[in-house]
Image (cartoon, rainbow, N blue to C red):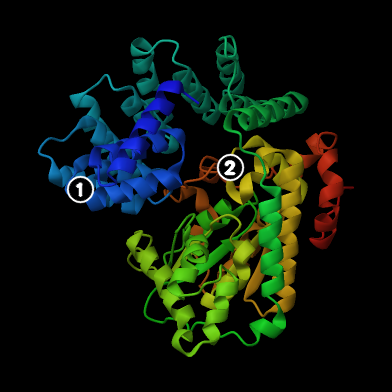
Amino acid sequence: MNKPHDDAETDARAALATDRNDLAATNALALLLFARGNLAEAELHARNAIRIGPENPQAHNLMGMILTESNRPQTGEFHYRQVLDLTEARDPVLLANLAWNLKSQGRMDEARALYRESRAARPDIRQTLFGFARLEEADRRFDAAADILDEMEGRFPDDPNLKLTRAVLLGRMRRFDEAIALIDTMGERESGLGPTELLEKGRLLDQLGRYDDAWTAFEAGKRLARERSGKAYLDEEAGRESARLTRFFVAPRLNLLPRAAPRRDVPQPIFILGFPRSGTTLVEQTLSAHPAIAAGDELPLIHEITRIMPRMLASPLAYPQALAELWMGDHRDGLETLRDHYLQKVRQLGVLRPGATRFTDKMPLNETHLGLIALLFPEAPLLHVLRHPLDVMVSCMSNHFTHGFFCASALETAARHYVRVTDLVAHYRAEMSLRYLAIRYEEIVRHHTASVAAMLAFVGEAFDPACLTFHDNRRYARTASYAQVTEPLYDRSVERWRHYRRQLEPAMAILAPAIERLGYDVV
């Protein structure tokens, strides 16, 4: 940790211990926690700052930053616009923050206009230029992104983030050798390459077919990320959760539990389930090209309901045992309350669009709570995206994500969590009736039209040819797959694991039961 940062946090906490309504200390602590990446606690203090000072622009700006980084950009936009209403000047930093927020919502033209206004007012703000360049890269305007980076080169020579951003852009332009050479120059500094740079280098090497070198970079990036963050797989916690869910969601109990009545007056969810890196973004991009289906992206709402359920059902028990309150006369409609909370949050998040009667929810590992989802939305389509487990492992190693108790911090832990989740899905399917369809990534690639038709038929929508050209869907996908889903369908990720057979051996024995159950092989 950084010593001045630690001292500032200690001072802010001390001030709040003396006066918990100290607005300046509350804002300061929220900002420090946000900078450290502790979004959950930062949000608690940011919310309190707004309670203390509902007309305080700094409090609303912090809330906007935190919500945007927490994948709730629609709500974050509200707070940024509150700042604009509360202040007379159009601060360039605020405009750039709002632009990043709008980019996260896929509103590229609006974001571009704000970046231009911000840059015109203050052309020397580094983060504004970075954000603008990343917007243009994400929107496939590669020349425009390169022009911004060229401008930055004169202002911020040798900036490592500038080099990494340019390397990502070169990779999008398929100039892989140049991108790798640029990252290698970053490795010449005293601190060497960081985790993000190592993973990016590994992905570039993979594109060039240099698989041994790519895996070396992946492993080094993961190892360094563990060392720097202190975050590793929470094995015992994951095991306890799995055990609790398996014990509770059994047929005798489920037969006694009610189901929420379906709502007919509002758009309804399509749950796209799957382990991270299994192809869920591809499926969402495909379905949301349909005029009747809006993209919800990674909605944190099912997880949120598991957290707030005890309070909403007035239960002394934690989830899932809190569902026992449904047997009480004064909570017999508890599932409707939780269902409506979910649907109200969807509306507040701005997911819905005119003409859409359905929306997607593709939060990674929602299948962990498949039982709860089926109680809340018994008629909702459950699309479970499957992919060869070893291909999933390669993709987990080549990307950073924190879902699943930090399981992707190492190969073996990703494999263990994968097995836990597949065991849970098998358990749910054996114990209760589900509107469930398994769709294989490999089938989508090999038999695209038939797979898309099957998915649309399953969710109850007529076939639309627009779903076949998902890459023309201008929506911005807020995941690591944002670049891949802008390309026409390709097959280079099918059986990618074969290039890494030797490196994957530690995971093969762990995954063997899941590989067999799902009908894959390692021949």
Viewer-side residue, 414 vs 514? 414
Residue 241, given in percent of the width and then of the height, sits at: 66, 60
Specify few, some or many for label 2: CA neighbours under 10 Å numbering under 14, 14-19, or 20 or more.
Answer: some
- Name the residue at 16% across, 35% down: 90
Instruction: Give amino acid for label 2.
Output: Phe
Please give left or right for residue 236 compared with residue 475 in the image.
Answer: right
Using the image, tell me which numbered label, if any, was put on residue 3. none
Q: Secondary structure at mark 1?
A: loop
Q: Which residue is mark 1?
A: 53
Using the image, tell me which numbered label, if any, was put on residue 401. 2
Instruction: Give amino acid for label 1.
Output: Gly
Q: Earlier in the sequence, mark 1 or mark 2?
A: 1
Specify few, some or many for label 1: CA neighbours under 10 Å numbering under 14, 14-19, or 20 or more.
Answer: some
Is the residue 425 above or below the residue 12 in the image?
below
- Name the residue at 42% across, 64% down: 291
Is the residue 436 above or below the residue 399 in the image?
below
Residue 203, given in percent of the width and then of the height, sits at: 64, 30
Any part of residue 107 in sight: no
Please give left or right for residue 485 compared with residue 441 in the image.
Answer: left
Q: Secondary structure at mark 2?
A: loop
Residue 308, given in percent of the width and then of the height, sits at: 46, 65
